[in-house]
Amino acid sequence: MLEVRRLSVNYGRHQALRDVDLQVRPGELVVMLGANGAGKSSLLRALGGMQRPADGSSVQLDGHDLIALQPHRIVEQGLALVPEGRGIFPTLTVRENLALGAFTARARKGESARYEEVITLFPKLRQRLGQAAATMSGGEQQMVAIGRALMSAPRLLLLDEPSLGLSPLMCSELFRAIALIRDQGVGVLLVEQNAYRSLEIADRGYLLENGRIVGSGSAAQLRNDSAVQRAYLGQH
Ligand code: ATP
């Protein structure tokens, strides 16, 4: 279980995140909704060890403190981040990208079974294993990025706007796969601007505004909330 308390992130004098509290339980899909600049990427980057949180912040995964750990140590603890822009290696093949995901000691055990699971989850990748990642469509590259993160055997997967720039069809395929990952027992924290689709698959959600959590609830509660509908679901 991910337990975040009083997480703050500062960029010089600018406070991008302020006293964020949140939980993600095993096998739970939680969406973080927020407009441009709300602080969503800062949150995920801080959890993944790519951005130093302010003093007094606390991040624990299954009771282990993650604050101040190097990013690779955080992956070793079972938290995998798929960053905005995916972060895959464009000149390497799909197979090589996936193999690189299994660099930690926790991932090497069971690597080949996990590899099979990943290409079962994303059947499109099976025909493309020898293809350079850069030559694939945006949606396929997102699958490679998520597949690579899954190769690290995470307990918790963090996804930064995976649907950005994808066609509606590709988006549906991707969100179906994300729901399946949750069904297999992995906790998922999904940062999205696509509130409509993410609330369709999520269990719970939080609303982030100007670096603060301003609301939370079950996915059904959020879908029916008039403020959420106005701000995120395009209904007035
Ligand atoms: P988007 O969806 O547009 O990426 P976001 O919700 O992910 O937005 P962040 O990228 O976390 O938001 O940015 C939160 C705030 O922090 C913004 O005001 C942004 O300009 C600022 N910010 C982000 N990264 C930095 C940085 N490296 N240096 C200074 N300010 C930053």
Image: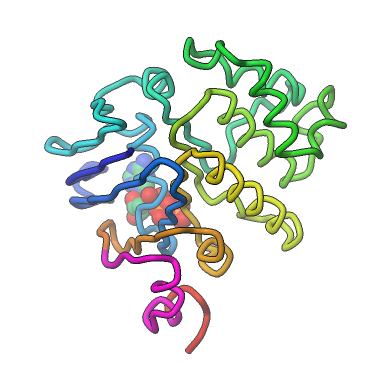
In the rendered image, the vertical position of residue 101 relative to residue 61, given as above or below: above
In the displayed image of the protein, which residue is found farthest to the right?
127
| Residue in view at x 50 percent, y 46 percent | 160
Residue 219 painted magenta = yes
In the displayed image of the protein, which residue is found farthest to the left?
56
**Magenta residues, start to end:** 214-230
| Residue in view at x 58 percent, y 42 percent | 181
Residue 91 painted magenta = no
- Name the quadrant of the N terminus: top left
Q: Position of residue 33 (x, y in %)?
A: 42, 61
Q: Quadrant of residue 2?
A: top left
Q: Position of residue 199 (x, y in %)?
A: 50, 65
| Residue in view at x 48 percent, y 50 percent | 190
Q: Position of residue 158 (x, y in %)?
A: 46, 41
Q: Relative to 47, is 165 on the left or the right? A: right
Compare residues 158 and 39 and report the one nearer the observer. Answer: 158
Q: Position of residue 19 (x, y in %)?
A: 18, 51
Compare residues 76 and 110 and report the one nearer the observer. Answer: 110
| Residue in view at x 30 percent, y 31 percent | 62
Q: Quadrant of residue 54?
A: top left
The chief SS type of the magenta part is: helix
In the rendered image, the vertical position of residue 22 relative to residue 51, given as above or below: below
